Amino acid sequence: MTDQDTVVSQEKFDEMIKELENLKTVRRTEIAENLEYARSLGDLSENAEYQEARELQAATEERIRKLEELVKRAKIVTDGKKKDVVGFSSTVTIKKEGSGDAHEYTIVGSEEADMRIHKLSHVSPLGAALMGKKKGDVFTFETPNGKQTYMVEKVA
C-alpha cells in the first residue's frame, strides 16, 4: 500500500461507485436541463439562474473528478483482521488514564472517518496510536492539549 492509496471498506467503495454513477447520469442531465432553461431566459451576463447553474455544474464536475480519483486509488480492505489486535475495521474500546469513561471506536479509512458516529481514521493521531495494540495495552499519543494516555479495554 502506498501513500497514494485510499483505504476503504467494500461498503464505502460501493457507496462511492453509486454516487459517481448518479452524478454522471442523473445529476449531469438535471444540470444540463437547468442550463438550457436558463439560456432560454435571455441575456446571460445578467442571468442569475444561468450563473447558478454554471456554478452547480462546476461543483458537480469537481466532485466527479475527486470520486474518480478516489475509486482509482482505492484499496479495499476486507475483514481479514486478527480478533485480538487493533487493525482496520476493528472496534476498540479504550479508557483514558485516570478516568472511568470508556469510549468505543471503529477503525476505518480516512474517507469513512466520522467522529459523530465513532468511526476513527487509521491515520489520525489516535487511530495510528491504536493500530497493532491488544487488550490491556497502555499507549500514549500527542494531542493539541499534550500527551494523553489510554488503555485498550476491548478489541472486537
Image (cartoon, grey):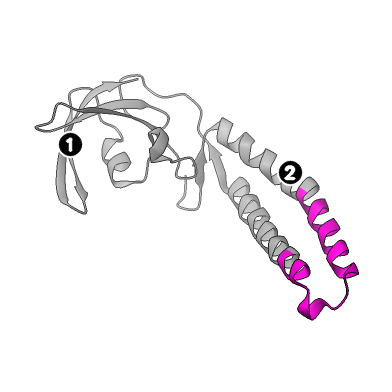
Where residue 86 appears, as percent x and y from the top left, is 32, 29
Q: Is residue 110 magenta?
A: no
Q: Which stretch is magenta?
A: 27-52
- The secondary element bearing badge 2 is classed as helix
Q: Pick the quarter of the image with the C terminus.
A: top left
Q: Is residue 120 visible?
A: no
Q: Nearer the viewer, mark 2 or mark 1?
A: 2
Where residue 100 appears, as percent x and y from the top left, is 14, 26
Determine which residue is flagged by label 2.
Answer: 22
* Number of residue marks: 2
Disc with the residue nearer the chain's start (2 vs 1): 2
Kindly indicate the quadrant of the structure image that contains residue 52.
bottom right
Where residue 92 appears, as percent x and y from the top left, is 31, 26
Is 156 situated above or below 119?
A: above
Q: Is residue 113 visible?
A: yes
- The secondary element bearing badge 1 is classed as strand
Q: Is residue 93 left or right of residue 151?
A: right
Helix, strand or loop: magenta stretch: helix
Residue at x-position 79% and y-position 57%: 31
Determine which residue is flagged by label 1.
Answer: 139
Crowding at mark 2 (Cα within 10 Å: few <14, some 14-19, many 20+): few
Instruction: Check the image and name the residue furthest to the right.
Output: 40
Residue at x-position 17% and y-position 52%: 145
Query: Callout 2, which amino acid?
Result: Asn
In front of the other: 26 or 36: 36
Residue at x-position 73% and y-position 61%: 57
Query: Callout 1, which amino acid?
Result: Phe
Q: Kindly report the distance in space between the C-alpha atoms of the residues bearing marks 2 and 1.
A: 43 Å
